[in-house]
Image: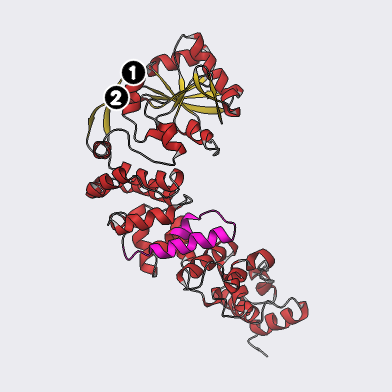
Amino acid sequence: MTQLTATGPRLIAGWLDAKPLRNVFAAFDAAQAEVRVVGGAIRNTLIDRPVIDVDLATPAVPEAVIELARRAGLGAHPTGIEHGTVTLVSEGVGFEVTTLRRDIETDGRHATVAFTQSWDEDAQRRDFTINALYCGPDGTIYDPMGGIADLRRRRVRFIGDGEARIREDYLRILRFFRFSAEYGKGHLDADGLAAAIKLKQGLSKLAAERVRSEFLKLLAAPYAAEVVRTMHESGILALVLPGTLHPERLARLQAIEAGLGQPPDVICGLAALAVSGPGDVDGLARRLRLSNNEASALRSAASVDPGLDPAQPEAAACAALYRLGTEAFRRAVVVAWARSNASATEAAWRKRALLADRWSPPKLPFSGSDVLALGIPAGPAVGEILRAFEAWWIAAAFPTDRALQLEKFEAFATNEVH
């Protein structure tokens, strides 16, 4: 929160007074170098959002930052020194400190920068007004681009000319949509949207890893559905994802998640939006450079197991939960719900979605060593016996009677099924 003082807006926040950051401020003060917090920490504090990272900006060049940190006994790592960034470590907490910059040359993907002593020049090269906020060690906020007013209106606005900002880096198209879904409550600045649509073909110049990072963050935003619908209608979404896309499913999914009290799940969002068949997962994995684990999770979330449908008996749902595992089942149910025509408040679907809260899948009561103990030699027969018993056990609704389990298990082992 802020309070107005004689010198202007002043930030009051616990993180600003925390010892690790005060140590960094003290190191700059001892060297008579200016430093300010910049960007997200200020923005999020002003609207009561969690602050995860605190980034800093300074007119001091990277070599000077490293030297002043050394004198103060702080760790210093040149994590992005070609762009002017040094990470300082104070009491185990890292702070990225970047020298003020201005763009010399841009090509839509990368920028060649030069260091500057001008805070205004540094602000002018940033993307949105709400990201060009600075805060001194005493809490005084510097807002050269009108970001506070835009933040209060939940307006994500490009600094200066939107087309010029996008031509500097086409990733800003996706950042415009992502920030609008996160901070703009789904509302899109008209000038920014027009610029994004006009220059949308520039997205083809971006590396898949950069597209992946922004788009997955977008899907995690609370107003992703509204923004994605606009991206779809404007032809931008088809430049980001392959295949047939279903923004209406994403909208239903987010309504379902909200009704269940769950935050947006990126894997579920991707499955609802862009997976209609098994082949779609492979295409998405390539386009977004998904890891093997992410692709596997996406494939499970898009499962069409009949037990997901609340029209099926709960025993079928328990079998699906056992086969898929708890996390995959939770995801698969809400995605199947989003694909259906049922409302986001449908009681039967809600009950099915919450099955894992009241029932946990049991562990298979026998293992390979139990088969060997019956005198069955090691080999393929061991797995076949276990699979046969497991199929019976699932179909019988996971009976717990030990005598019955042993009877069936031994029967499969001796090929004398009763």
Q: Residue at x 52, y 28 (%)?
A: 94
Give coordinates of residue 202: x percent, y percent. 23, 46
Q: Which residues are magenta?
A: 243-269
Q: As shown in the figure, which amino acid type bears the numbered disc 1?
A: Ser
- Structural crowding at the residue carrying mark 1, measured as other residues with C-alpha within 10 Å and reported as few (<14), some (14–19) or many (≥20): few
- In magenta segment, residue 219: no
Under mark 2, the amino acid is Arg
Structural crowding at the residue carrying mark 2, measured as other residues with C-alpha within 10 Å and reported as few (<14), some (14–19) or many (≥20): many
Residue occupied by mark 1: 118
Residue 315 placement, left or right of 55: right
Q: Is residue 252 above or below residue 63?
A: below
In contact (CB < 8 Å): disc 2 and disc 1? yes
Q: Position of residue 332 (x, y in %)?
A: 52, 66
How far across and how far down the image is residue 143, in percent?
42, 26
For residue 407, say whether it is visible: yes
The residue that appears at 69% across and 71% down in the rendered structure is 365
**Residue at label 2?**
102
Q: Which mark is residue 109?
A: none
Q: Nearer the viewer, mark 2 or mark 1?
A: 1
* Quarter occupied by residue 308: bottom right
Dot 1 falls on a residue whose secondary structure is: loop
Residue situated in front as seen by the camera: 203 or 306: 203
